[in-house]
Image (cartoon, rainbow, N blue to C red):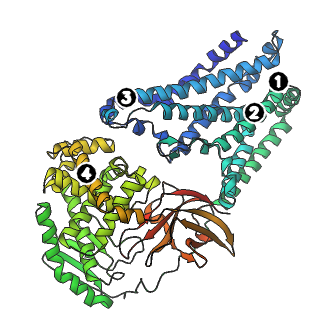
Amino acid sequence: MIALYRKELRALWPLGLLAFVVLSGDVFERPFTERLDEKAWEDIASYVSPGDADTFGWMLILLAGFVAYAAFPREHDERTIRFLHALPIRPRAIFAAKVAAGLTVLFGACAVLMGTDGLMGSMGAETLTGGHWRARLAFTHLALQCAFCFVAYAHGLFASVLRLFGLIPYALLLVVAHVLEDVFAPAAWIDPTRLLAARYHGAALVVPWGPLAAHLAVALGVLGAAYLSWMGPADRVGRGLERARRTVVGKLALGCGTVVAVLAVLVLLVVVSEPSEEVDAPEDPSVVETPSFETRTVRTERWEVTYPVSHEARARALIDEADALHEAVRRRLGADVGPTLVADLTEVSGDHRGIASWTHVRVGLVTEPDLTRLRRVLAHETVHAFQHRLSDRRQGQHERATRFFAEGSAEYLSYEVVPGDRARDVGRLVAAGAWERHGVRFEDLVDDAHLRARYDTTLAYALGERWTAALVDACGSDAISDALRAMGREDAPRGLSPRTFWEDTLRAAGCDLERVDAAFARLMEAEVARRRARIDALPRIGGGVVGARDGRVRIVALLDRAPEPGWDFHVRLRRGPDAEDTEAFAVRGRADPDDPRRIRFEVPRALLPAARFQLLFGVRLEAHAWPWSATWQWASAP
């Protein structure tokens, strides 16, 4: 048994080398192309990040398939299987040796991957700031990888009985699983790559015990079937099929069967990918006005503005103040005048009030009748235009690390330029509530991917505004523009992790991230103390999907207290944490007449992003203010 196991390992060493190159080959490339001292372990070991499971899972499936097909088919093709059967060794020992050798290669490749990624991650300065190698997370994910390899290897051994033709049923099964996932959410567990999907409860990796147990049980049964096919009574049938396959009739039958199976897979894929009819969410006529198609363009000293003629009075009122807003933003950033900015006031969008690029801004004039809010939106987007120029567009290139600052500093400066209403006060209440209730910290803000995976992304505005205030308090009134210029300097390093990016940027700007962190903590604790009673009055919101009726999915939010007059509840839905903000949509809810703490939502089934999706409950405490939200949670359509 031991000698046979060693013989199998020697035969598999080329595949072991292939597995090492595919999984860990970057250990020879990264040290020469990247600054490892500026990388966090989680950036290197991307498979522990949400959303990266599919690619990594398919890599392991392919490797497991290669190893499985190198077991018995190789022995039969080289006709060495007769020699193995002639040895004084029981068939189950031969089978066990091959299985053990194959799993050793796969498990070893996963262990080496963990080791090389951990080694490279240990070289980063993030070991001092929380981005270092975490043993519990690493070993938990390694155990999931090994379990996944066992499942894939067992199915590979069984599929190898029919050689390449054995892959066709599995391809059909994966396509069927994809179809079932869209129409029957509980069937999503059939996709084995979901075992590697990194989901977290706080900082702890969530192990999918139910799907894992089901896949392991099925894999054990399939492994038994593979034993019967290769070493047991069914082996005689296999040898008969092998002899038949070498005849002309057998080759013709196999070829025709393969063509039919491939065509079946292609037809099913076409059916699955057929676009479904899209259903647009109804618009609220009280919010969205219809602009005319006729537009007019006006030039001022700093702007070229296009607006719909149907809203000329509102546009003229904003244009009259546009140059003054531009000058106020320019002085606060200490920037030169720069090129003329182009403003499009014909924007009509339910996703945003404004948007900006290098020299172009768009503002939702049509949907916003209040002149003060319009001025603030224009000031906000003007700040964005200056941000792009002062940072030489580097801020946009590092959006994962800078989004909270981009939106937060634009929010901060727009209120400095256009002081105002209670919306800013409510935004600070939301920020203080997120700090106190959800425990959101700078580490969450600085990595936008992590922020959007769990929290409402509008926190980038509310908390980003408070962080900008802390930056100004700690580093001076020019800190915003100094940070932007530091991002755009020619010798700025590339490929930094989010926190290291900010350490480098603030150091170049003559400040220090630790000082800003301390100022941010002091400011937020003061906000919490100042607003303690109002934070305690914020509702805790739970709930989920409760059923379906007449083509609509019913969702209920449960509050821990009765809502106050004027609160406007909504639920946002998206397909998963990797969805863009523009892909999520919101549905407003109504309080249950019998129990005002129950907020009911009805969503047309056609609007659901998937059979399994995420939802986020929220409440807008005041009109035009940032909402107070719970955290994202998974749900399934009934």
Q: Which residue is disc 2 drawn over?
A: 220
Q: Which structural element holds mark 3? A: loop
Residue 548 marker: none
First in residue order: circle 3 vs circle 2? 3
The residue under the point 77% across, 32% down is 161
Number of residues whose C-alpha sits closer than 10 Å to that of mark 4, classed few (under 14), some (14–19) or many (20 or more): few
Quarter of the image for residue 427 reads bottom left
Residue 115 vertical placement versus 151 (above, below): above
Residue 122 marker: 3
**Front position in the image: 48 or 17:** 48
Name the amino acid type tagged 1: Met
Residue 480 vertical placement versus 224 (above, below): below
Q: Which structural element holds mark 1? A: loop
Q: Which structural element holds mark 4? A: helix
Cα distance, mark 4 to mark 2?
Answer: 56 Å
Measured as percent of width and height from the top left, residue 559 is found at 53, 66
Q: Which residue is disc 1 drawn over?
A: 231
Number of residues whose C-alpha sits closer than 10 Å to that of mark 1, classed few (under 14), some (14–19) or many (20 or more): many
Cα distance, mark 2 to mark 1?
Answer: 16 Å
Quarter of the image for residue 93 reads top right
Mark toward the viewer: 3 or 4: 4
Measured as percent of width and height from the top left, residue 199 is found at 53, 46
First in residue order: circle 3 vs circle 1? 3
Cβ atoms under marks 4 and 2 closer than 8 Å: no
First in residue order: circle 4 vs circle 1? 1
Name the amino acid type tagged 2: Leu
Q: Is residue 542 left or right of residue 496?
A: right
